[in-house]
Image (spheres, rainbow, N blue to C red):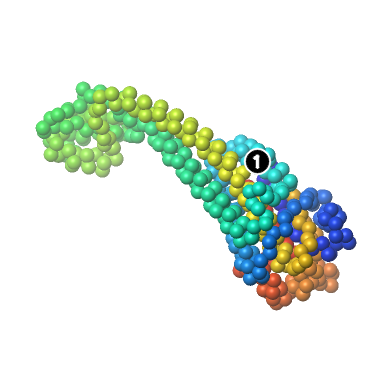
Amino acid sequence: MPSSTKYILVSLPLRIFDSSDQEDALSSLSATITPDNGTVLPFPIPSFKIGTLDALVQQADDLAKLDAACNGVVLKVADSLRSILDGDDDKTEQQKMVNDKPTDHYLRTFNWNTVRYRADRPIGELLENLQKELQNIDNDVKAKFSQYNGVKTNLAALKRKQTGNLATKSLTPIVDPALLVQESEYLETHLIVVPTIARKEFLRSYETLAPMVVPRSSIQVAQDDEFTLFAVTTFKKHSAEFLQKCREQKWTPRQYKYVEGGKEEEQRELERVTKEEKKVWGEALRLGRTGWSESVMVWAHVLSLRVFVETVLRYGLPLEFVCALVKTTEKQATKVKTALDSAYSYLGGNALGRDKRGRVTKDDASLTSEMAAQGLGGEGAEYTAYVYYEIEIP
């Protein structure tokens, strides 16, 4: 599905059309929008149980919030999939299936799932169930991807120990324990990583950094492209001062304790975490696919409820309306909106009118009272003369 695809949900009262037939109304709507600007498809919505006006107004507000929450979860799942697939957009798109079919196919052929969400239940109950489902999806995906990121970070740290430079890699396979003074009451050996460009300076000055450094005790243990590793022996009572002086010179003391079989143990740990990372990667991918499918389905059902509630509030009873899904592009969406405004702005009563040139205009005072009378909008809401929602699938 192209990233520029945009969907628009529109609901209009059947009374404004020449025929009360749904198909005729969709044909008329298609002629208004024109095929050049978008494809008009039926978006069937069941006849839900209508409660009181106060309940509908509250549900309209709750559904607007849940709609935004759905958008947020779908975005997060998309980002998680993209992350686990190393930012590969093509591979990410392949995972964005709903019921094993492309997301676009699901939206274009949407039907309310009456088995999962009984349409004869109160709207408030349906809303609550959808809210719980969305929260569970969000929690499950977040937990699994957090687990994967933890394992991935752990594996990266283990790999750095194997392949990093002398300042970061494990010293277990590098240091010969025979070089270390061990089990001495007075002496101990320190391992110091020195930038290779400072090697001569280190050899010239290490003996005088602190009292009681054993003369000529420096031994070069290893060297790479950036650093040289030295072993130096000091008396224990001056070890802390010696190490502090090394840090001041930007020479890095490395902690190391010889453990028999340590090299083999590190390799086993690397192999174990590598297997774990592959396993959790597969689990995260599967859950990401499921999370995408489930969250898009929840979103589509939330939008259905939202259109229904807004339709009742705007057009009243008896409830006879047509709902359409318009598939368009980011670029053409403005033209779709302009065509709809031009044809149906009169539904807004005094709130929307036309100037002398026939262009649609808004009367802010009438607009406010119209929205208040219908229980619509809210802070920051943009009023349209008809039920209209834009949907962008990431």
- Front one among 7 and 201: 7
Disc 1 target residue: 99
Q: Specify whether 225 is left or right of 41.
A: left
Q: Residue at x 53, y 52 (%)?
A: 135
Q: Is residue 128 left or right of residue 108?
A: left
Relative to residue 172, is residue 95 drawn left or right? right
Residue at 65 percent across and 38 percent down: it is 100
- Find residue 238 and report its image quarter: top left
- At label 1, which amino acid type do we have? Asn
The x and y percentages for residue 36 are 82, 50
Residue, far left: 185
* Percent coordinates x, y for residue 298 in the rendering: 62, 50
Rendered view: 54 above or below 279: below
- Please name whichever residue, 156 or 1, is drawn nearer the observer in this view of the structure: 1
Taking the view exactly as shown, the residue that stands out farthest to the right is 18
Task: Classify mark 1: helix, strand or loop.
Answer: loop
Q: Viewer-proximal residue, 116 or 164? A: 116
Q: Quadrant of the N terminus?
A: top right
Total count of labels: 1
Where residue 63 appears, as percent x and y from the top left, is 62, 60
Residue 380 appears in the picture as rendered: no
Q: Residue at x 41, y 31 (%)?
A: 273
Q: Is residue 70 visible?
A: yes
Label 1 neighbour load within 10 Å: few <14, some 14-19, many 20+: some
Is residue 323 positioned above or below 364 on the image? above
**Residue 263 point in image, percent of width and height:** 31, 25
Q: Residue at x 77, y 74 (%)?
A: 350
* 130 left or right of 358 in image: left
- Which of the 4 image quarters holds residue 378? bottom right
Of 296 and 151, the residue lying toward us: 296
- The correct choice, above or below, for 251 with respect to 31 in the image is above
